[in-house]
Every structure is written in C-alpha cells, then in structure tokens.
Image (cartoon, grey):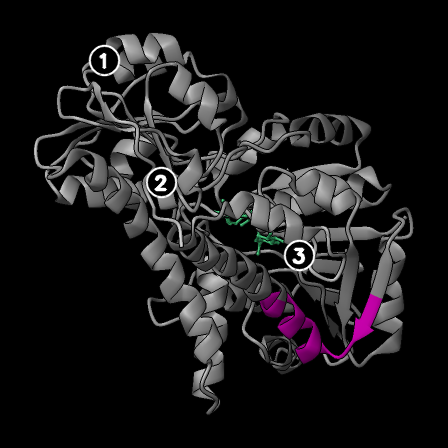
Amino acid sequence: MAELAVIGCGYVGAVTAACFAHLGHRVQAIDLNRDRVSLLRDGQSPIHEPGLETILRQQIQSGRLRFDSSYPDRLDAEIIFIAVDTPGSAEGAADLGAVRAAVGTIASRVAPDAIIVNKSTVPVGTGELVEELVHGAGIYAARVVSNPEFLREGSAVEDFLRPDRVILGSSDEDALDSVASLYEGIDTTIVRVDMRTAETIKYASNAFLATKISFINEMAAVCESLGADVTAVAHGMGLDSRIGGQFLSAGLGWGGNCFPKDVRALAHMAAVHGTHPQLLRSVMAINADQRLRAIQKVRSALGSLNGMRLLVLGAAFKGGTDDIRQSPALEVVRLLLIEGAHVVVYDPVVREDDLIEALPGVNTCTDVVSGATGVDGIILATDWLEFRDLPLDRMRAVAHRGVFVDARNFLDPVTVRRAGFHYLCLGRPRAEGPAIDCQGFPSSPVLSGSLV
Ligand code: UGA
C-alpha cells in the first residue's frame, strides 16, 4: 500500500483518486474548488460517471480516500499525481497555468525524494519543465514520471481498472518501478518509455482515434455517392483484426474536451517544430464539415430552414455523459439557429442551466413528445442508448412534418419509417425514406442518392 496524493479532482483526478484507493492505496485528493470537494466528500460525483459514486462512498468510508480544498503545509505522499486541467487555445497551444501553479505550490511541501507523476495531457516536454520547477525549488532528489490517462468519459472507472495498457515515461528506473507497483492489482501491459515518448503516445492515440472517425465520415460521403451503406462497410472493415471495429461509427464527428484539443495541440506542436501536419489538418477539416453535412440533410428535406421548428435530440458530446464541451450536437444547434430555425433541445442528463448558458435563448424540453409537438423536423444528435426506445408513433402524431435526420446512424431505419417519418441519415442512401412534400405526406418512393 502506498501513500498517494492527487492534485485536481476533475473527471481524471477524481477517478484516479477513487480507483487507487479501491486498489488499496491511501489517497489524499486536493482540489481548490470547494463546491467540488464538498460534493466528493459526501460521496457524490460532480460529473455523470457510472460506478464512480459507489467507489467514492466505499473508499471514503474505508478511510483510504479523503478530499481537501487546500494544500497542507507538508505533503507526506510518496507519489503525487498532477491531474489538473490544461485548456487549449484556438491555435492549439496548451495553457499550462494550472500545472505550473500546482507544481509551484507542492514543490516546497513534498518529501525530498517524492515522485511527481503527470496525468494531465500536457505538451511534449512538459515533464522536463516540471522537473525544472521542482529542482528549482530545491527538491533535487524529486523524480518526475509521465503516466498519461486513457479514460473515456462515461466509462472512466472501467477504463482505469481494466486498461488496455499503462504507459509510464521516465529515465529513472526506480521511479518507474514505484509507479508501476501501484498498478499491481491490475492485469495489464505496462509500457516503460522515456518521458517525451510517453507524452507523445497520449497525443498520438487520441489523434489516431480521431483519424479513424474522420476516415469513416469521409467514407460515409463516398458511400452516399456510390450507393453503399457505411455501417455495413465499417462492419466489414472492422472484422479485419488489423483494422478493428471500434471508432468506426460515422455520424456528426468527434467532440468533447479531449479529441478537439489534443488533435489541435499535436498539429500545433508539429507545426511549431517545423513539420507540416497535413493528415491531422485534414482530419480536423473533415470533422468540421461533418456538422455541415447534417445541416445539409435537414435542408434537403425542408428547403430553407428559416422559421422551421426543429427538435434536436441530445446535447452531450456523446451518449453516457453530461459533458457538453465541444459537443457536435450543440454545434449543430448553433448552425440551425444561424439559419433562422426555432430549435428545442432534449437531453436526458444535461442540466437545463448548462444548456441555456451554452446556448442563450435556446428552448429546452423535459420529454421528447412535448418537444416534438408542432415541429417540422427532428435531428438525433447524440447517441444516448435511451433514444433506441423513442416513442416514435406518439412523436409523429404530434409533429407537424415528419422529417427525421438520424445524424448518428443510431436507429433502425425501418422502425422510424414505420412510425411515418421521412428517415434521413449519413452514408446509407438505401436506408433513407421516401421524400415528402411540404405538407408532410410522402410524394414519391424514390431513394435519395444515385446508384452507379
Ligand atoms: C477520449 C479517448 O477515447 C480516451 O482514451 C482519452 O483518455 C480521453 O479522450 C482523454 O484524452 O481524456 P472521450 O473524450 O471521453 O475519450 O470520448 P470518446 O469515447 O473517445 O469519444 C470522442 C468523440 O468521438 C465523441 O464525440 C464520440 O461521439 C465520437 N465518436 C466516437 C464517433 O463519432 N464515432 C465513433 O466511432 C466513436
């Protein structure tokens, strides 16, 4: 059992602290946000993260996990994890203010031989900066290790306890041994590399996953012009173990607080160091276009969107989380509003206050049937599992016109069409329903998209 400290209790810090306590270590977690700390002390998660509250409560009760909103005079922990936010600028440069502040504060309080571990996603070379800061404060024996996180929001606890791999970066073998031993209770592969390589593995992993998604989104456009079905193409490709089936769902493109920031940051780092990151730039451009393709779908069915009433299903950047940062769904809402549409948004978990703060003036609803009342069209923008059971018949009965754009290719086309909707999606021309005239009645049973 080791004595650990975790600085920063956002989704990475809170999950890291709770899961290390679950593995048997004693953890002091510190965050300067008092509201967050008081929630965590009560065993409540400040984010929607399945499984986290159970572990929090168990570990607080066991006495292995505690939360504080200020730094003690002395941090006795042998290993201190830095898990603070590193927001990105529009150009891609990461703001290291919180990392500098955290390291600056702990430098004078840690044990002389403490190990400081970077969990935050930081620009390549930051580990060396942290080393300089700590050594500059006179703690010459302190060592720094990079241990990037690969936690998905919505399954972060599962990802922590059952990781595909753990990456550790340092030139100090003893420090690597100490951090590796924390993961002893977990059956996984531990990869030991130098610090810069560990930092790069994190960016390269996120960038590769984003590339996979942009690839399949480009294929969706190709499938539409060739008359193929992108979901079947992805399935057929994914069965090849060299390709793998995950992260091949075409839709609105990637969002959230990680991929957009990290792909931009990697491209920025590459460009600053004199290389031309042309693949990464295309990956970002395809992603931005994907939102426009969804809008184009709505326009193809309704014509001008000015004055149209639309229901957007989902606000979170993906199903299973309440996070709306860089959400493709919200970008779609913004584009619809710019075109003059009246938009009402439904999300099963995102708080109304957060939505209104992100999209001032937007209308929200608390159930999908009231949201669908009088609308000209419905756009499914987030892959919430519960959308698989939408009361489609009731929604169609109250909607003015029956356009349904499934921008995540998430529903069964036949079921949606059977409820009387004109079903549109991305990259599946044969799955789409007959065109409707502006009164809402089917006009001709043509397939959109032409066959070669
Ligand atoms: C991502 C990575 O998956 C984690 O490994 C990493 O630790 C984390 O970023 C991070 O850097 O902190 P997360 O942002 O929670 O995790 O979300 P993902 O599940 O990766 O999804 C990202 C975006 O891609 C979402 O908008 C999702 O809807 C979209 N997506 C995902 C697709 O459009 N298609 C897919 O097939 C998969």
Q: Residue at x 31, y 44 (%)?
A: 294
Q: Which residue is mark 2?
A: 329
**Mark 2: which amino acid?**
Ala
**Mark 1: which amino acid?**
Thr
Say few, some or many: other residues with alpha carbon within 10 Å of mark 2 (under 14 / 14 to 19 / 20 or more).
many
Label 3 CB sits under 8 Å from any ligand 1 atom: yes
Q: Nearer the viewer, mark 1 or mark 2?
A: 1
Dots 1, 3 in contact, CB < 8 A:
no
Residue 237 at x, y percent in the picture: 65, 54
Q: Which residues are magenta?
A: 191-204
Among numbered discs 1 and 2, the one appearing first in the sequence? 2
Secondary structure of the residue carrying numbered label 2: helix
Instruction: Kindly report the secondary structure that dominates the magenta region of the rendered protein.
Output: helix
**Nearer-the-camera pick, 421 or 50:** 421
Check the image and report above or below for 327 versus 201: above
Is residue 422 a member of the stretch shown in magenta?
Answer: no
Q: Which residue is mark 1?
A: 373
Say few, some or many: other residues with alpha carbon within 10 Å of mark 3 (under 14 / 14 to 19 / 20 or more).
many
Residue 261 at x, y percent in the picture: 45, 62
Q: Would you say residue 290 is visible in this rendering? A: yes
| Residue 198 location, quadrant | bottom right
Q: Which residue is mark 3?
A: 149
Q: Is residue 78 left or right of residue 323?
A: right
Secondary structure of the residue carrying numbered label 1: loop
**Nearer-the-camera pick, 319 or 432:** 432
Q: Would you say residue 30 is visible in this rendering? A: no
Q: CA distance from mark 1 to mark 3?
A: 43 Å
Q: Nearer the viewer, mark 2 or mark 3?
A: 2
Q: Residue at x 59, y 65 (%)?
A: 208
Q: Is residue 290 left or right of residue 244?
A: left
Q: Looking at the rendered structure, which numbered label has been put on residue 276?
A: none
Say few, some or many: other residues with alpha carbon within 10 Å of mark 1 (under 14 / 14 to 19 / 20 or more).
some
